[in-house]
Image (spheres, rainbow, N blue to C red):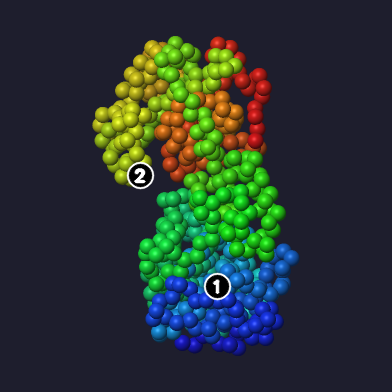
Amino acid sequence: MKQSDNRHAPSGNNYRKEIHGGDAMAKYKPTKFKLKTSRYDKEKADFAVEFIENLCHTKGIWYGKKFKLLDWQEQIIRDIFGTVKPDGYRQFNFAYVEIPKKNGKSEIAAAIALLLLCGDGEQGAEIYGCASDRAQAAIVFDVAKEMVKLSPALRKRCIISESKKRITYKPTNSFYQVVSSEVASKHGYNVHGVVFDELHAQPNRKLYDVMTKGSGDARMQPLFFLITTAGDNTNSICYEVHQKAKDIIAGRKIDPTFYPVIYGADESDDWSDPKVWAKANPSLGKTINIDKVRAAYESARQQPSEENSFRQLRLNQWVKQAVRWMPMEIWDKCAFAIDCKNLEGRACYGGLDISTTTDLTSFVLVFPPEDEDDKYQILPFFWVPEETLDLRVRRDHVPYDLWARQGFLQVTEGNVIHYEYIENFIDELGKKYNIREIAFDRWGAEHVVQNLDKLGFTVVRFGQGYKDMSPPTKELMNLALSRQLAHGGHPILRWNMDNIYIRKDPAGNIKPDKEKSTEKIDGAVATVMALDRALKGGGVVEKSVYDERGLITF
C-alpha cells in the first residue's frame, strides 16, 4: 500500500536528527500486543512520527514550535501506525488511551486526526471528531485547525470551514468533520478515522455505536482513536471500554485489533505521594508543572468535596461521582451505637423521601442532642416492594436481599410500594418517639402526606433547590467532621451517603443531585431534610443552630 504522496508530506529525516540527535526513538520496543504474524514496519512508523513532529504546538509558551513527541506519545504512534499485518495494513483498528488532564490529549488527538486526513494515503477519507457535545468536539478541531494554519504545506492543501467545523484535504478529497451526541441521526458514514475526545462524557452509547459498528467496513485500515480521562459513571460506554482495556492489559481477554493504554494510579496507591502523581502523569515536568499538581492536592486535602475531582482528573481514577462529597472515612467515624430504647419519648424530626412505586422509599428520624455531650442521632428506615427484590439484586448488584434478612430493609407486599403500610409504620413510630415534624419532598408525596396529616403529624413541605438544601447539607458535613453525628453504621444509609453527587451554584450553595448521582441517595436526602428541621426545632432548647453560630462554609 502506498503510504502517502510525499509531495504533500512534511520532510522529516533532518528534522528528526536535529530534535532527537538520532534517526528514531532509541528505546523503542514493539508493543506486547503485536501478533506473531504481524511485524513492526519502521518506515511507516517513522513517517507517522515525522509527520506529527513537523506540526506545531498551538498554545502557550510552545505556540509555533515544532511538536516534539514525548516518549509515551511516540510509543503510541509507533505502535499504532508501525504494527502491520502480513498484508501491510495496520493491525490495530481501535486505540484506547486513558490519561489524566493536561498531559497533551487534545494535541495528540488533533495530530492523529490530521495524519489520518493528510498523510495516510486514503482517497476520500472521512475523519470524524466526536465528543459529548459540539463545544467539546470543537476543542480538538480548533487545535487541528491551528496546526494547519501553522504548517505552510498543509495550509496550501487544506480548506478550513469554521462554521461547519470541517477541514478538507484537497489532494485526496478527504475531510475531517466534527460531530457530537447532540446530532439526532448519524448513519451512513464511511469512516476511515474517528477521534473520540473525552469518551467518559458521552451521555449514552448511541454515538459510539453508530461511529464504530460497521461504519468502517469499506475501509482497509480504519482507526478509532479513543482518548479520555477517567469518568464517574460505571454504567457508561466508556467504562465498558475501560474494562475491556484493563482485561486486555492483564491478559484476561484477547483482541488483536484493540490497542490499550491506561495511565493512572491504582486503587491501593497513596494519592498524596508525588511518586504516584508521576506514575499517573507521563508528561509531568514537561507539559505539567508539579507545583500545580501539588496545589491541586493541597486544595483537595483541605476540602473533602474536591478529593474525587483530584483523583479523577489528576490521577485518572474512576470515581463514583465527579465531586465526592462525603468521604467514607469521615462518615464511618460517626458510627456510634444507637440505643432505640433510650430514644423513646425524645423529640425528633423526620425526613420522608417517597419513591416511585417500584423504587426505594426512605424515612429518617433525627434526634437533636439534649446536652453538650449528646450527638445528633440518626435513625433510618427503608422499604422496597417484595416482588422486585431479586430483580434489584441482579440489576443493581446491590445486596438488598442481605439487608432485608439483616433487618435494615423492609419489604412491602406486591410489586409496588405499599404506601398504606408505610403510613401505618410511621404512625407506630409516632407512638414511640416524639415526632415534632416530618419534612417531605412535595414531588410524588401528596397522598401519603395527606394521610400523615390526618394521623395528627405536622408535615412540612421541603424544597429541593439550593435555598432549602444548601444550609442543612453543609451542616451535615460539618457535624460529620466534628463527630457530632451518630448513625450506628446503618449499611443502606452509608451506601446512600457514598453515592451522593453534589451540585454547586456560582454563589457556593450546594445540594444533592439525584440526576447526577449514579446510584440511590434517597436516604441521604431524607437525612438532610430531617436534619434541617432538627437544627431549627431543637430538642430541649427550642432554637436554631444557625441562629447560634451561623453556617459553616467550605
**Would you say 430 lies left or right of 484 here?**
left
Residue 34 found in image quarter: bottom left
Mark 1 is on which residue type? Gln
Mark 2 is on which residue type? His
**Mark 1 residue element:** helix
In the rendered structure, which disc, 1 or 2, sits on the residue that comes first in sequence?
A: 1
At label 2, counting other C-alpha atoms closer than 10 Å, the crowd grade (few under 14, some 14-19, many 20 or more) is few
Tell me the mark number nearer the camera, choosing from 1 and 2: 1
Dot 2 corresponds to which residue?
Answer: 397
Name above or below for residue 144 compared with residue 535: below
Q: Position of residue 318 (x, y in %)?
A: 50, 51
Disc assigned to residue 453:
none
- How far apart marks 1 and 2 lie (CA) works out to 38 Å
Q: Quadrant of the C terminus?
A: top right
Front residue of 265/180: it is 265
Disc assigned to residue 75:
1
Q: Position of residue 290 (x, y in %)?
A: 68, 56
At 28% across and 40% down in the image, what residue appears?
390
Single out the residue that lies furthest toward the right: 61
Q: Position of residue 248 (x, y in %)?
A: 41, 64
User: How many marks can you see?
Assistant: 2
**Mark 2 residue element:** loop
**Would you say 180 lies left or right of 546 here?**
left
Q: Position of residue 134 (x, y in %)?
A: 55, 59
At 55% across and 44% down in the image, what residue appears?
323
